[in-house]
Image (cartoon, grey):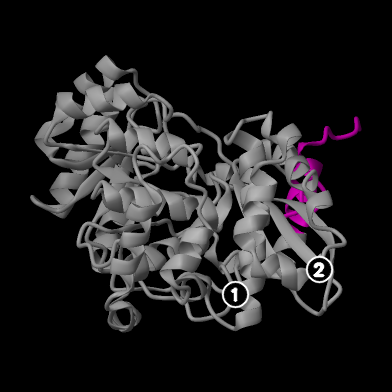
Amino acid sequence: MSTFTALDVQDVRFPTSRNLDGSDAMNTDPDYSAAYLTVRTDAPDEGTALVFTIGRGNDVQSAAIAALAPHLVGREVEAVLADLGGMYRELAHDSQLRWLGPDKGVMTMAIGAVVNALWDLRARREGRPLWLTLASLSPEELLDLVDLRYLEDALTREEALEILRRGAEGKERRIAALRERGVPAYTTTPGWLGYSDEKLTRLLREARAEGFEMVKLKVGADAADDERRMRIAREVLGEGFPIAIDANQRWGAAEAIEAIRSLAAYDPYWVEEPTSPDDILAHAAIRRGVSPIRIATGEQGASRVLFKQLLQAGSIDVLQADATRVAGVNENLAILLLAKKFDVPVCPHAGGVGLCEMVQHLAFLDAVAIAGTDSRRRIEFVDHLHEHFEVPVRIVDGAYMAPEEPGGGARMHAASVSDHLFPDGPVWADEQAALAPTAAG
């Protein structure tokens, strides 16, 4: 038997704002960052996860994760890993910490980090990638991981179990097919708002040459710029090529409808985050106002309850699950089940450090054991920072190929972590030295 000994949290930041990588209408100077968690044991293994942030929020997020240490330190590893549904509920129902949400925000994201790190440890002990560890569970075992509280008016336990039992049929055939062909990706790499028209054009051509069959552009800062960039993209990629756009919450409802209609001539495939991520009724109004253009959201969806309401209200055409925004694998299972109940495709968000590596496991699980084959499914891909991960995503002809290495995908190279520790890692120490005033001669 082994024992948990520590929750080791490190503040890892990458200076992506220097080249405006990740820039959009709301986040003009993002430094892609990770509150990087290692759950340590007295055995020769450990679990790893991270929470994606974009800079100073890492201070708060790291403190929130550390506050959960009393729930794990000193406990028997094997007992916890055998009941990750129970551990998820224990963390989520800590009443004093839940008060800070409830079920949303920094504390929920911290819980997600711990839950995801425990799943990483379990998958490593089983010698399997996380998606296959989850897909190998029976329908009943998967359902025991889910908290259906507050969801029963939209998804009963009986309905959820029926979805999972249907998903178990033909599962091995789907696993083989996914290992052969993967899951289609779309790329946001060309579309950051801070890029020049020349860089946009070059990256669009490269994306198509690399086999991507969909791209996404950031919009929302300036209407004339949006129109010009969409025109360039349509000219480069041709009619019928799917081009999604992402406003990153920039507009109010009426403003969104007007802005989307002004771009309708360029045939946007979907419009992502047109308004506040919490405004369910505004999303519904926008969707009605711009139909048949699709509306997508979810990367900042705070909880399974929010997703339930988005689906009940008919607010979205595409659900964009995120690996680190909600309370980990378990809550994302509930969201995948809801999406299947309402027949809305899950196209995970992956624009951020480590998100591609982590969220692909949710998409592969969905394809194997929940929603099954769905031609509408795509996973976002951004070509940033993958070299820092022990098992970087593998893209072949514009598709994510199934990871086969054990774990959940979040583990970084030790040197990448140490180099980018904030504020004392070499990357940041050099910057601080450059900013320091020179002594008078």
Q: Is residue 241 shown left or right of residue 316? A: left
For the point 74% across and 41% down, the residue is 64
Task: Identify the magenta region.
Answer: 419-441
Q: Is residue 218 shown left or right of residue 240? A: right
Residue 45 appears at what percent x and percent y? 76, 76
For the point 74% across and 44% down, the residue is 62
Q: Is residue 82 above or below residue 426?
A: below
Task: In this rendered view, identify the residue nearer to me: 90 or 52.
Answer: 90
Check disc 1 and give the amino acid type: Ala
Task: In this rendered view, identify the residue nearer to me: 403 or 381.
Answer: 403
Q: Is residue 430 magenta?
A: yes
| Quadrant holding the C terminus | top right
Q: Is residue 261 above or below residue 144?
A: above
Q: Is residue 132 shown left or right of residue 379? A: right
**Residue 255, picture quadrant:** top left
**Residue 117, picture quadrant:** bottom right
Residue 246 appears at what percent x and percent y? 33, 38
The residue wearing badge 2 is 76
Q: Is residue 205 above or below residue 341?
A: below
Q: Secondary structure at mark 2?
A: loop
Q: Nearer the viewer, mark 1 or mark 2?
A: 2
Tell me if residue 106 can be seen: yes
The residue wearing badge 1 is 123
